[in-house]
Amino acid sequence: MLKSFKRLVNPTAKTKRDEEALISSIKQHPLPQHIAIITDGNGRWARKRGLPRTAGHAAGMMRIREIIRSADEIGLPVLTFYSFSTENWKRPRKEVEYLMRLPIEFLKSDLKELIERNVKVQMLGDKQQTPQETYAALLEFEKQTAQNTGLILNFAINYGSRGEIIHAVQQMIQDAKNNQIDADMIDESLFSQYLLTKGLPDPDMVIRTSGEVRVSNFLLWQIAYSELWFTDALWPDFTSYMLFEAIQEFQSRTRRYGAVT
Ligand code: IPE
Ligand code: IPE
Ligand code: MG
């Protein structure tokens, strides 16, 4: 299903030498601990080529593979992809069905490599509401990579940040009723423990492709102090080189957290 679109995913315009120089430059400074990516623009990428939207999703998945490899190669600790939002169920049934098949395809094609790379795959979002086969594939990813200690790779699937926050509040009320917590104990750190990202560092950087400049219900709590990076590139055109450029710019920014530097 995916191979046929391979030739349409442009290789990076830069030479290998340019890329190596950029990698060695970013390795001289601290890397972000967590990059979260809103992989947007698959549909427009396909439309530009007179292809169905699903072709854009297939091409986008190949880009996900490339970006995982690059993130792993530079030693990024945590990488998160926003792959399917709770709002994306509003799309045409055929498109949703196709998107729900992608994790199954990805499991077949990439699980082995991810295990070899020591990547730990985790899902953010309510995976139980996905079709049975998708759910099984998502569980299999988590199970097969649970012991891995390298790159933590999160896929936000059937994820919505407001829903996540509401769920956290419900859990806290339940724990309060059971006398496990009380109101005085609630602070930012405790609240974070009730979110799906429990135990993960907040994203240092959020990347969104496709020229849209919004967050679309993604990690609203967790991105309070993230550095944002927007590009007009459509997701299937997003190259490793662009990832490295984004990291380089991140390294040149001053994060003040409200203080004076
Ligand atoms: C992002 O690409 C992938 C998903 C939301 C699943 P889109 O499908 O949103 O592509 P555009 O925004 O229509 O171009
Ligand atoms: C955001 O993209 C969600 C994902 C990339 C999965 P959308 O294409 O769904 O966002 P909107 O609708 O343009 O805000
Ligand atoms: Mg979109």
Image: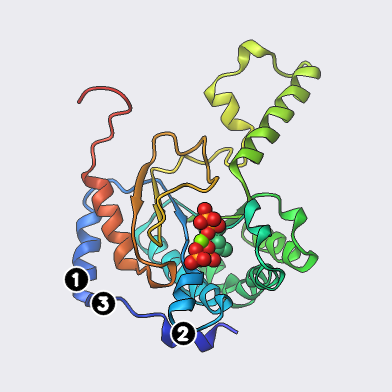
Q: Which residue is drawn at 24% across and 51% down?
A: 249
Q: Is 203 placed left or right of 11 in the picture?
A: right
How far apart in space, not on screen, are marks 2 and 3 (Cα)? Answer: 16 Å
Percent of width and height locating residue 261: 20, 26
- Closer to the N terminus: mark 2 or mark 3? 2
How far apart in space, not on screen, are marks 3 and 1 (Cα)? Answer: 10 Å
Marking on residue 18: 1
Q: Which residue is drawn at 21% across and 63% down?
A: 22
Say what secondary structure mark 3 lies in. Answer: loop
Viewer-side residue, 24 vs 60: 60
Q: Do the residues labelled 2 and 3 touch (CB within 8 Å)?
A: no
Marking on residue 13: 3
Instruction: Read off the residue under disc 2.
Output: 6
Q: Is 140 placed left or right of 119 in the picture?
A: right
Amino acid type for the residue under numbered disc 1? Asp
Q: Say if residue 148 shows up in the picture.
A: no
Quadrant into which the N terminus falls: bottom right
Q: Which class describes the residues within 10 Å of circle 2: few (<14), some (14-19), or many (20+)? A: few
Q: Which class describes the residues within 10 Å of circle 3: few (<14), some (14-19), or many (20+)? A: few
Q: Nearer the viewer, mark 1 or mark 2?
A: 2
Q: Which of marks 3 and 1 is in front?
A: 3
Amino acid type for the residue under numbered disc 2? Lys
Marking on residue 189: none
Percent of width and height locating residue 23: 25, 62
